[in-house]
Image (tube, grey):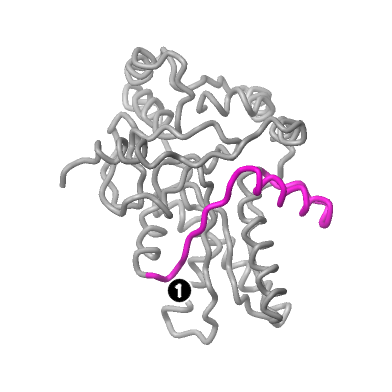
Amino acid sequence: MVRVSYDQKPYRRALMEAFGASVTASPSIETQTGRAILAQDPDCNGSLGMAISEAVEVAAQDPHTKYALGSVLNHVLLHQTVIGLEAIEQMAMADDEPDILIGCTGGGSNFAGLVMPYLGRKIKGHASNPRVIAVEPSACPSLTRGRYTYDFGDTGHLTPLVKMHTLGSTFVPPGIHAGGLRYHGMAPLVSHVMNLGLIEAVSVQQLDAFAAGIQFARAEGILPAPEANHAVAGAIAEALRCKQEGVARTILFSLSGHGHFDMQSYIAYQAGQLQNYDYPEEEIAMALADLPTI
């Protein structure tokens, strides 16, 4: 588990431990990759790329252990399309079609799960032609500020190269509370449709995302996860745009998770302890300098 999430999200760790799991903060001293990272930065917050490297290293050394990535790779996106397929059926029951589709994006799986079935219909000539908006954190802006190129999916370069929008595999994001959106790259298929101009991307600051989540909770009675707050913020922004333009549009967004295991982040937000963060251009450039030469 990424070290900053290990510290920020104790309830997630406690739930896993309740079912018998052993949870280790990454980077750790248990792998060669982790020890090398800690030797350079003993206080490293970790990243999803680092945690993947450690997990792959452990799995590769044990013939009885398998590793399955939960996001980013195209087969994961395929499984997630049940979200969009169900949404199409539900919208048909409501006798409506979305004019705008919105999802939060980190690795891209829940976003793709919602929008890919709709994009498939669009490519095949279906009458509906919704705008598709990916919403990512300003602190980890792979789509809005990353480069579309081949890169490793992990920091230790143990995984295959994939073509994606990336901030560089050595990118270490700040400790924003949307842990699921802190990955350095974007799913190849999401990156591809972005490159084709079929979707657009915007970034949202952490404080704006939490404000949107609080507003949604008070209106709908559901407290979203910090990750999902980004999609909520995107939906609210588009709804306000409709209001300003005096037009009616149907907005469909993915509420990808509840925030019941993230209450510490809401406590910090309400106490004024969170801050916005724009990743410096020079640090992005440094991470991109380590891209593999193809």
Q: How far across and down, in percent of the image, does residue 239 sit?
A: 69, 68
Quarter location, residue 89: bottom right
Q: Answer with the quarter of the image where residue 95 lies.
A: bottom right
Front-most of residues 32 and 62 = 32
Decide if residue 195 is on the left or right side of residue 96. left
Which residue in the rendered view is the most extreme toward the left?
Answer: 294
Residue 115 higher or lower than 55, as above or below = below
Range covered by the magenta-colored residues: 197-225
* Residue 220 vertical placement versus 242 (above, below): above
Residue located 52% across and 23% down the image: 3
Task: Classify 106 as above or below 268.
Answer: below
Please tell me whether mark 1 sits on a helix, a strand or a loop: helix
Position of 149 with respect to 52 (left or right) is left
Mark 1, other Cα within 10 Å: few <14 / some 14–19 / many ≥20: few
Instruction: Identify which residue is drawn at 47% across, 43% down.
Output: 140
Residue at (36% x, 29% y) in the render: 53
Q: Residue at x 65, y 34 (%)?
A: 274
Q: Indicate left or right for 211 with 50 as reference.
A: right
* In magenta stretch: residue 222: yes
Residue 183 on the magenta segment: no
- Residue designated by label 1: 120
> How many numbered badges does the structure rendering display?
1
Where does the image place residue 222, in percent across and percent down from the top left? Answer: 78, 50
Residue 74: x percent and y percent? 39, 54
For residue 25, side relative to residue 207 (left or right): left
Residue 101 place in picture, x, y as percent: 58, 68
Q: Amino acid at mark 1?
A: Gly
* Residue nearest the viewer, comparing 4 with 189: 4
